[in-house]
């Protein structure tokens, strides 16, 4: 028998686990239908927020430009050989990094004064939209202030700051520029402390700052915000804003972009960065020609002085010797020496130039040295031939040689200088601007209004659904009577939630810690209500349950306050009385009982007064407006309700009323709060529990049953109160359906 029981228990446990693991999609869908109003409202709020954001957000415009990176720099026609010395190639990736370098962007920041930020003070939320949509005219240059708030800019106001210098401790601090009219202004802190006053076009300074405003166009009292930002921070900010990407692999085409709310600002910044970049590229490509030109410019004056000195010596010697002429033999030697000296001097210049670039052991440098040595050897051989000439011819040869050599060298250097100057001036670099920066003001790139509204709506819907599903997963209140019957407690009746009862209580939901108190009886005011019909079915069930009971006393309790014990007790008593039974209802909640309010009575002369011996049974019972229904109110609140119920007077009361009435209903306080229901139920023949739909948990109901069983009391059944028709439990396997069935009038 035990083995069979264990097998049965294991089977039930596995089935229970399987049911827990199953996901009831229909129930989840039903939960969403139950909260459809919440989901719709929540989604609508997000949609409204998305629409507001899309409407009031300032549009962001994008300036675009295009730059081409060529493989080789161009050369000047006629100087291909010379210009080839300075050709260079550059990859697009390298050029992109150079373009976004701090050096280039920093120059743009300095040139355009981008580290000075000045803008009109706009009214929060919708002030920006008003400012953007206003179109100034000659007759109406500024928009009219809304609500008389003339300190804000509403449209048409402009400011151009030429110079703003502050000490380091004031960098990043916001100042307020207020227009005073007649081209005057004042500068103050955000707290309102005036720092200085000035006039447009003139410099105004204090010990800590200096300010020069180039132009100011605004109504008097209009305020502008002004601040000096850190230069490096602005450079880094622009580096993150400026986009640069190569269009296609190895295409050499770089697309530049910059997004900003001010299209003119985006254009100016992007054009300035591009022009600085191209200028730097040209300077970089012509740097070698420039360096060579600077070297020649240093050598030219030296060679010129040497030429002048040689000519003076030659002329002086001819005067001294009275115009001596060079013989044909000497002339031939002179021409050879001049060629060698010229070549030697040219090689010496190349050696000096190479010495600036390479070390002495470099092959290029060593090659020049070898050439110089060879020329000098030829020169020594000619010098030996000169020794056989007459002394006069030797001196004349030497002086003439100096003049002609220096003249050849000077002419050569001058020609080289002119060639390099042409090459430097003609260098165009290996990058060029294809498209200057432009902005399509008719199509801002941000915000994507339709996308924002759609995404906000979807996000709102998803969050609302998530909230509903999370609440359902966290909420463990009983919503299906099958959960109660799984505990072994029969459900005698499922009482639907009554909207009419809400009207009787005066408000839909009681405040925290208090109970909604009806001032009338639903069974009398609206006997056709579905809740009353359910209680009539409870009356039928009790008829059979009371057959085996020890007396005709019914104790009604519940796990916690607010489950509707008093509602069930009063209306059940009324329904029983309407069936020609003499019924007594006793309010055994001597702490917070309020049955007297539903019957329009006073609480005095009730149960506590009878148990304390102050009054007799006839004085404690009162006739209600319902025929055959008597009421015993709670009476005066005693300090010891449980002790009064344990007194023999309560046993005496139960015996007397049991004989006098057909049915006695005792409304007790919640069992989990006090022990009074256990004492009352010990004298009753039937104990009923009232649990509320979605409020009490299974564990709570199980603990309630255990509390009664610990006192030797068997709970006959449960009244499932306040059942709400919900889509989530309409798909369950267990259903209690209540239909309205009225007679025709």
Image (cartoon, rainbow, N blue to C red):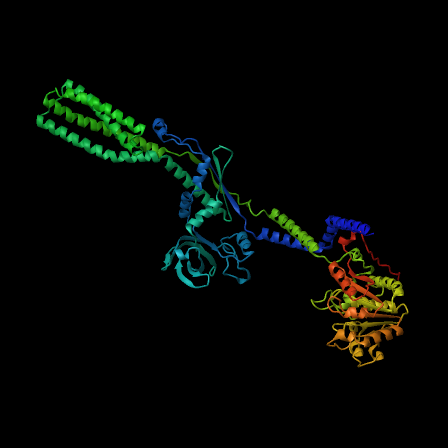
Residue found 49% across the figure and 32% down from its top: 251
Viewer can see residue 200: no
Query: With 115 as the anchor, is 336 left or right in this view?
Result: left
User: Quick one: which residue is furthest to the bottom in this view?
Assistant: 614
Where 654 falls versus 696 (above or below)? below
Tell me residue 412's x, y (percent): 26, 28
Query: Where 563 sits versus 473, above or below?
Result: below
Q: Nearer the viewer, residue 200 or 62?
A: 62
The foreground one among 85 and 259 is 85
* Residue furthest out toward the right: 580
Image coordinates for residue 320, horizontal then vertical, percent: 8, 28
How many marks do you count on the picture? 0
Residue 577: x and y in percent read 87, 69
Residue 642 occupies quadrant: bottom right
Where in the figure is residue 246, as x and y percent of width and height?
49, 36
Compared with 156, 363 (above or below) is above
Residue at image position (18%, 21%) is 382
């Amino acid at each position: 028998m035990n083995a069979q029981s264990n097998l049965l228990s294991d089977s039930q446990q596995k089935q229970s686990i399987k049911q827990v693991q199953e996901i009831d999609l229909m129930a989840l869908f039903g939960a969403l239908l139950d909260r459809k109003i919440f989901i719709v409202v929540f989604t609508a709020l997000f949609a409204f927020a998305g629409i507001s954001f899309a409407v009031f957000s300032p549009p962001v415009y994008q300036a675009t430009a295009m730059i081409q990176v060529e493989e080789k720099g161009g050369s000047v026609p006629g100087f291909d050989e010379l210009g080839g010395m300075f050709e260079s190639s550059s990859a697009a990736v390298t050029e992109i990094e150079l373009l976004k370098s701090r050096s280039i962007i920093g120059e743009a920041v300095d040139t355009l004064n981008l580290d000075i930020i000045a803008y009109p003070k706009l009214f929060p939320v919708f002030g920006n939209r008003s400012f953007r949509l206003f179109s100034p005219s000659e007759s109406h240059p500024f928009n009219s202030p809304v609500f008389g708030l003339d300190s804000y800019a509403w449209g048409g106001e402009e400011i151009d700051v030429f110079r703003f210098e502050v000490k380091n401790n004031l960098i990043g601090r916001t100042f307020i520029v207020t227009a005073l009219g007649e081209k005057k202004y004042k500068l103050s802190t955000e707290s309102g402390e005036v720092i200085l006053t000035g006039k447009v076009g003139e410099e105004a300074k204090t010990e800590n700052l200096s300010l020069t405003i180039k132009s100011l166009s605004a109504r008097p009292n209009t305020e502008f915000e002004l601040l000096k930002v850190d230069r490096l921070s602005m450079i880094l900010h622009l580096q993150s804003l400026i986009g640069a990407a190569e269009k296609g692999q190895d295409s050499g085409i770089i697309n530049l972009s910059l997004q900003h709310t001010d299209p003119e600002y985006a254009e100016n910044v992007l054009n300035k960065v591009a022009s600085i970049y191209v200028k730097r590229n040209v300077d970089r490509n012509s740097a070698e020609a420039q360096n060579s030109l600077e070297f020649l410019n240093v050598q030219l004056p030296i060679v010129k002085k040497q030429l002048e000195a040689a000519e003076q010596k030659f002329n002086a010697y001819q005067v001294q010797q009275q115009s001596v002429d060079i013989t044909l033999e000497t002339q031939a030697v002179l021409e050879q020496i001049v060629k060698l000296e010229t070549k030697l001097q040219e090689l010496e210049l190349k050696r000096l130039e190479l010495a600036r670039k390479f070390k002495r052991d470099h092959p290029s440098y060593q090659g020049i040295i070898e050439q110089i040595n060879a020329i000098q050897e030829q020169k020594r051989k000619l010098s030996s031939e000169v020794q056989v000439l007459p002394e006069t011819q030797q001196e004349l040869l030497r002086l003439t040689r100096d003049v002609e050599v220096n003249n050849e060298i000077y002419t050569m250097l001058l020609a080289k200088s002119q060639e390099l100057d042409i090459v430097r001036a003609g260098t165009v670099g290996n990058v060029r601007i294809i498209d200057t920066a432009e902005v399509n003001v008719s199509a801002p790139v941000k915000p994507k209004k339709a996308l924002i509204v759609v995404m906000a709506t979807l996000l709102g819907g998803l969050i609302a659904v998530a909230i509903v599903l999370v609440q359902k997963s966290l909420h463990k209140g009983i919503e299906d009577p099958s959960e109660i019957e799984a505990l072994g407690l029969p459900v005698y009746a499922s009482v639907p939630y009554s909207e009419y009862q809400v009207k009787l209580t005066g408000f839909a939901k009681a405040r925290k810690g208090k109970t909604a108190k009806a001032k009338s009886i639903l069974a009398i005011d609206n006997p056709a209500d579905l809740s009353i019909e359910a209680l009539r079915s409870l009356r039928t069930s009790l008829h059979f349950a009371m057959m085996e009971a020890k007396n005709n006393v019914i104790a009604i309790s519940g796990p916690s306050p607010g489950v509707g014990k008093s509602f069930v007790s009063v209306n059940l008593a009324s329904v029983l009385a309407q069936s020609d039974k003499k019924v007594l209802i006793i309010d055994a909640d001597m702490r917070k009982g309020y049955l007297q309010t539903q019957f329009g009575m006073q609480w005095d002369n009730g149960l506590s007064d009878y148990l304390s011996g102050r009054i007799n049974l006839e004085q404690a019972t009162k006739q209600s407006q319902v025929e055959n229904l008597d009421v015993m109110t709670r009476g005066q609140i005693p300090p010891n309700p449980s002790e009064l119920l344990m007194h023999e007077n309560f046993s005496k009361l139960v015996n007397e009323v049991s004989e006098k009435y057909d049915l006695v209903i005792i409304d007790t306080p919640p069992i989990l709060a006090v022990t009074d229901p256990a004492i009352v139920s010990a004298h009753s023949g039937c104990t009923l529990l009232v649990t509320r739909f979605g409020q009490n948990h299974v564990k709570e109901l199980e603990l309630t049953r255990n509390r009664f069983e610990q006192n030797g009391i068997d709970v006959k059944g449960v009244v499932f109160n306040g059942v709400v028709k919900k889509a989530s439990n309409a798909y369950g396997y267990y259903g209690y359906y209540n239909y309205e069935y009225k007679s025709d009038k």
